[in-house]
Image: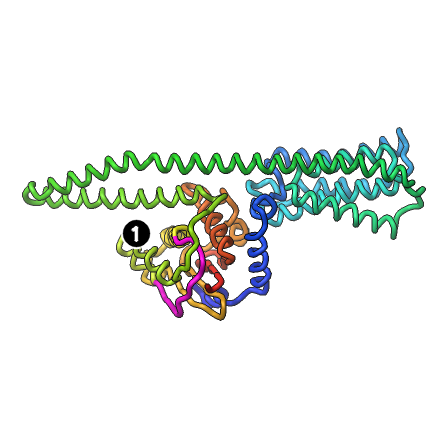
Amino acid sequence: MNEELQRAAYSLPPLAAFESVTMHLRRKAPAEVLQSLVEPILHPSRWRIRALGVSTLVGHPLFYAIWALWLRQPYENLALRMLMALLGLSLFVIPGVTASPPTRAAAIIFSGVFWVTLPWFFSWMYFCNSGNPVWLASMGAMLLIYYHLTDWRLATVGAASGVLVAWLCFEALGPPAPPIGLQLAATNTIVLGFCWFMGLVLGLSSSNLRREQLNYTLGTMGIMAHELRTPLATMQLIAEAVRNEAPQVPGESGERLQQLGTRLNTLVRNMNHQIDMQITNARLMRPVGAPERISAADLVRRAVEAYPYRSTREKQAVVVQVYSDFRFVGSRDMFTQVVDNLTKNALRSLASASSSPQPGDLLIEIGAHGNRGRIVFTDNGVGMEESLRKRIFQPFFSTDRGTGHGLGLAFCQRVVHGAHGTIRVKTAPHQGAVFTIELPVA
């Protein structure tokens, strides 16, 4: 691990205080409002993103022709329509926007494109056309479409801000237009209020449905992992039987039987440990556990000692360094799983490196500064690209395409956030990774 990454592990980022306040608000707020996953793009399949791009690219010139040349409206603007069409075209050229899950940058750009083309543009046209029936209906359709494109929280904020900014733009730059009368304004407000309310209800119900589907999927994964214990219990009995019979077999054959029984017993132990990890990770949406004051040093040492290493060399690669112990409030079982997940990922990264692991290749450091304690995992593994680093905490995203399910780090983030802490990563290709957990001292 180079010195730059090492220093980065212990430097407090400028946004750390803001992240701490945000985590505190998430803890206090209802789960439906803040703690559930906010998705900038709903169902981001490649076909859906491209269909939205085509609709925006083709729809704006088409409706310009309808409202300007056929069924003429008081106000139309070809330049503005073409700008909206170009924003639709951008969905075809933004890298990663159709990835699953989409990159963070692509999701932000997607949200910006449809904030401009939906709430802002439709509100601008509504004001410029004095709230006439065509644009009243268009505004109602826009609200329903917007709530089906993005998470209901983002849609609510986006719709409110889009209307406000469009009104300010109209007041400052808008064309001359007859004022909207009081009676028309009241009528339109009722109609648009109904459309907004239905969009909100549909968005809430869709969010609950997605949450239930995710819970069901994760629950099924947990059940399947649990069911594997039955054949493993049989393997355990076979291993014990082999070890018991080994002393009765003379010579080298007995020694081989003893070794075989021991290896089989170790394999069962490792598999049971992996099953425990999968069952716990499957509780991604509701990591629970009885809170208690935990010694960080004791937690890490116990977890590292109990970890099922594949070899003595792998175990020797893990070094725990305690500068100053601290206590924090959380679930011991959940945080043990966090240490297990981070240890497993680091050892996998070391295994992918060209050289065999050496003592200290995975360094776990524990220290406290003021009212904040830190647990830092520094490995000399293969590291990762910046594009991957930004996505590793997303559920179902994994850098291990062969066996990874993408739940481990998402679970870690939820557990740490639930204890009012933060977790971040510093990494670079072929330079290892530094995972820093920061927690309030209890």
**Relative horizontal placement of residue 210, taking residue 283 as reference (left or right):** right
Total count of labels: 1
Compared across the picture, whether 76 is left or right of 225 comes to right
Q: Which quadrant of the structure image shows residue 240?
A: top left
Prevailing SS of the magenta stretch:
strand
Classify 279 as above or below 377.
Answer: above
Q: Residue at x 37, y 63 (%)?
A: 297
* x then y, percent, for residue 425: 49, 57
Range drawn in magenta: 320-332
Display coloring: rainbow
Task: Name the residue: 77% across, 38% down.
Answer: 193
Mark 1, Cα crowd under 10 Å, few <14 / some 14-19 / many 20+, is: some
Residue 392 colored in magenta in the image = no
The answer to whether residue 376 is left or right of residue 261 is: right
x and y, in percent, of residue 184 in the image? 88, 37
* Residue at figure coordinates x 47%, y 48% from the top left: 411
| Residue nearest the observer in this picture, 438 or 424 | 438
Q: Amino acid at mark 1?
A: Tyr
Instruction: Tell me where residue 419 appears, x and y as whole percent.
Output: 49, 56
| Residue 90 seen | yes
Residue position marked by numbered label 1 in the rendering: 309
Q: Secondary structure at mark 1?
A: loop
x%, y% of residue 414? 49, 50
